[in-house]
Amino acid sequence: MPQTATQTASTATDQSATVNRLPRATYRIQLRSDFGFESLQQLVPYLRALGISDLYLSPLFHAREDSQHGYDVVDHRRIESAFGDHESLRQLADAAEHAGMGIVLDIVPNHMGINDPDNAHWNDVLENGPAARSAIFFDIDWNPPGSDFPNRVLLPFLGKPFGETLEAAELQVRREPDGFTLQYFNRRFPLTPASWAVILEHAAAALPQSVDRQTQEELYSIVTQLQRLSQQTSTIEERYREQSVARRRLTQLQRNESAVVAAIEDAIKEINGTVGEPRSFDALEALLNQQYYRLAFWQVAVDEINYRRFFDINDLAAIRVEEPAVFDAVHSLTFDLMKRGIVTGLRVDHPDGLLDPAEYFKDLQTAFKKSKPNSENRDLWVVAEKILSGDESLPEDWEISGTTGYEFLNQLSGVLVDPNGVSKLQSFYHALTQAPEHPRDVAYQGKMTILHDAMASEVFVLASHLFRLARADRRSCDFTHPVLTRALQEWIACFSVYRTYTRPVGWDVGSEDNGRIRDAIRWAKIRNPTMSRAALDFLARVLLLEFPVDLSEQLKSRWRALAVRLQQVTGPVTAKGIEDTAFYRYYPLVSLNEVGAELGSSGSTTEDFHRHMQRRVTDWPRSLSTTATHDAKRGEDVRARLHVLSEIPERYQQDFRRWDAEVKPLVRCHDEKEVPDVNSRYLIHQTLLGTWPIDPNSDGTGTKIWEHYTQRMLAYFKKAFREAKQQTSWRLPSESFESAIDTFVTEILSDREHDRFHLIDTLARQIAGPGYVNSLSQLILKATLPGIPDFYQGNEFWDFHLVDPDNRQAVDFETRTVVLREVRSQYSTGPLELVRSLRSGFSNELKLFTTSRALHTRQQHWAAFASGDYCPLLTSGGFAENVIAFSRRYQDRLVVVVVPRLPQQFLQSDSPVVSLDPWLASAWADTTVMLPSDSRVPLRDTFTDQIFNVTADKNGGGHLRLSKVFGEFPFGILTN
């Protein structure tokens, strides 16, 4: 066999000296109402013993009621009370600091939740419109093109059309102590104070004669004061002052005069209308027409939304942190926590949604240094949730330590599959499903689905601005709105990355952005030979800021404004069109469809992988290295198991065809199509294989196990097929289609005596053993490769969950704590005996042991990992291609890492493997790992505590025989 890899080391500098605190290993915690700061504080000793250096918390800011994740923040200045208070957070930080641990906080600067009365900024906008103090917070187009409702923000929150909702009396005015609100089920919307005059006039006219004159005059005086507000002749501050006075007067009047309260309630009752009497709702409709918002059926958002959203989620409004006042308000609590030493690092959510990410990160670092004047000019450790597509690099002008690690996850997945096998699976899949031959076409179609549906309103607004620019110049004034709309759609659908980074100031477009813009224009022309090329060329000139020589300065600014604004739309379209659409339509090997992955990826060689890691150690060695996140499509062990299919493509083809023949009787007809069709059945088959319950200590026949599993699968497939947006969707769910899918899956899982069940069970058990080996290789690589290893909560045990909400379940930390204590105790008395016991099966203890030992080594040899070089090691022999080997060295610290790759190739039969024994000792035959001459020192294995001597070579170097290194445990982390 040829030798693999190259022995060229890539060096890193001393990274720990460049930031305020460099984590050694992070542990992601999803804060919940039943798992807050006090619960987490109790967990600190366990995580410290496991080898974790930093707690990595989901957002802790006050979010909307019953938030499941914390990303729908309604007040960035407050801690979510469900998690605890400032004191309990401080106690958590004290416990962490005492254990030598830091706290990394996930922050959300891009958007806010607006479906909650506690969002004071949004309520201010609804009450006061464009003149609101908080109007600066949000991207609202108060005069959208073609709108008949100027100065009103669309609120697409109604469950049915506005007229039906109104006449069903589902919209009701409610009296508050200091004003009035509009109630829609459990939602309340403020009414602008000027409109209160309508209600109070009704009440004043109906006051009984017994009410004294002074009270009547006071009520009419308040009405007059409110009517003056509607004239909008006063300054903003005067209006707020007058509103405040009116509120106090109304509160006092209601407190003192029960007759006034009764009259107000009667007026409200009349305004609210009577079901069955349509004309009785005219007054309420008139009142609503006075508001700075327009309530509408939720599906109207597709065409008319006029505030920038987070993706296509109506309840999340984007915010403008580029404004200093907004930046300060959004980060006030964060900087206070950093100043007090409670928070030591940040994860920034969705920076691609920001107007100018580079400037934002600069502002973040500047604010940190102001809050920590004794930071010795070190930067704050910040990682960004940035998705890198293809060969895209992280922008060098971002003042951050790296990304949250999706590119690492996908590079790791790529080296753990067999590229040749993936290609065979792709050929089989294309022939089976008649899928487009090139994944690029699927990605294009997915993005076009989003552009024509979920984000059509954003495209319409952008096209309208583009149309205005075109009309302003005689050289482009003949382009029609429809032509420019299509040009925008086609360009966005052909764009290859999430966004460009043209700055709001200056006049240059970066060279990489320039190339990508032109490439997308070229592809748009290729895909649309009958489309106006001139319109696409005009769009290109605008995006590239190639101004005509006589273009006015005003028009130049408008060109730039459009180019910058468009950047904030391409990211959401790409995410929704590929990750949340195309990934659920095209899946030759579903384990490769992960956040940030290239659709249709076929894996990589070890040489390619080493090149990625050499760049990583040089360019971004402080990035997170993740294998599981709260947003991941599949749990890390699901992916690892399914990777094995790339090693047995022929066997998989045969097994799928046999299984597909067995389930054909369960297929139904829906709209003259098979349900599920063969593409859907393919997804169902691989998903079941990847998540199939396999417990070595159980026969797998427990009824409760399968009932719970069935419910999980039904929930997942409902989400998966809605995301695909072909036969059903979130916006237009098909009950008949989804019912047919439910029946199909339930029939498969309920009859455990049928061949269709046994065919999955047999193949799942065959790939399970090699899958566990993949999982442990993946774990060890994450802990030792360049970067900061990140562990998602609970994943020190096997994790076979799927996308959220399946992966956000409560974690049994009590059991994990007990197991870790036992494993550490047994290791201290007999490492080899413990390894021999654990390798006899694939228990949770095995994964936790491997995690603990890998992180323990990382702590002991921290310098080698924090600042050491990365050197791929040559391998030779019969299984040279089945090994990933490298060293990390810093000064006198040396770590050699060797793990298996493509483990199925070792097996000589189709029988299920229930232990690590097939990958031990002689199975590796003559396979060796080459070491340079300066590495010929005795090496101790972190798992078995054995010492191995490096055998000298004739050329002055040395080598390790894997039959010895893997004699007791088929994974090695060797240190001097």
Image: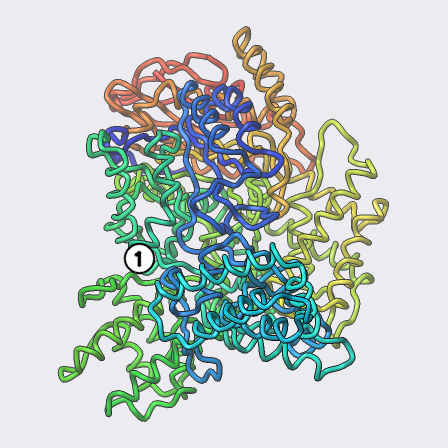
Quadrant showing the C terminus? top left
Whether residue 900 appears in this view of the structure is no
The residue sitting at the top extreme is 829
Task: Determine whether 917 is above or below 623 in the image.
Answer: above
> Going 38% across and 38% down the picture, which residue do you hit?
2
Q: Position of residue 190 (x, y in %)?
A: 54, 63
Q: Position of residue 31 (x, y in %)?
A: 55, 38
> Going 49% across and 50% down the picture, which residue do you hit?
73
The crowding category of the residue bearing disc 1, from other C-alpha atoms within 10 Å (few below 14, some 14 to 19, many at least 20), is: some
Task: Determine whether 355 is above or below 197 in the image.
Answer: above
> Going 61% across and 55% down the picture, which residue do you hit?
256
Tell me which corner region of the image, top left, top right, bottom left or bottom right, holds residue 339: top left
Q: Nearer the viewer, residue 392 or 36?
A: 36
Tell me which corner region of the image, top left, top right, bottom left or bottom right, holds residue 366: top left
Q: Position of residue 823 (x, y in %)?
A: 58, 16
| Residue bearing mark 1 | 322
Q: Nearer the viewer, residue 818 or 81?
A: 81
Q: Amino acid at mark 1?
A: Glu
Give SS at disc 1.
loop
> Going 46% across and 12% down the picture, which residue do you hit?
946
Left or right: 565 as drawn, with respect to 212: left
Q: Position of residue 550 (x, y in %)?
A: 14, 84
Left or right: 650 as drawn, with respect to 524: right
Whether residue 715 appears in this view of the structure is yes
Quadrant showing the N terminus? top left
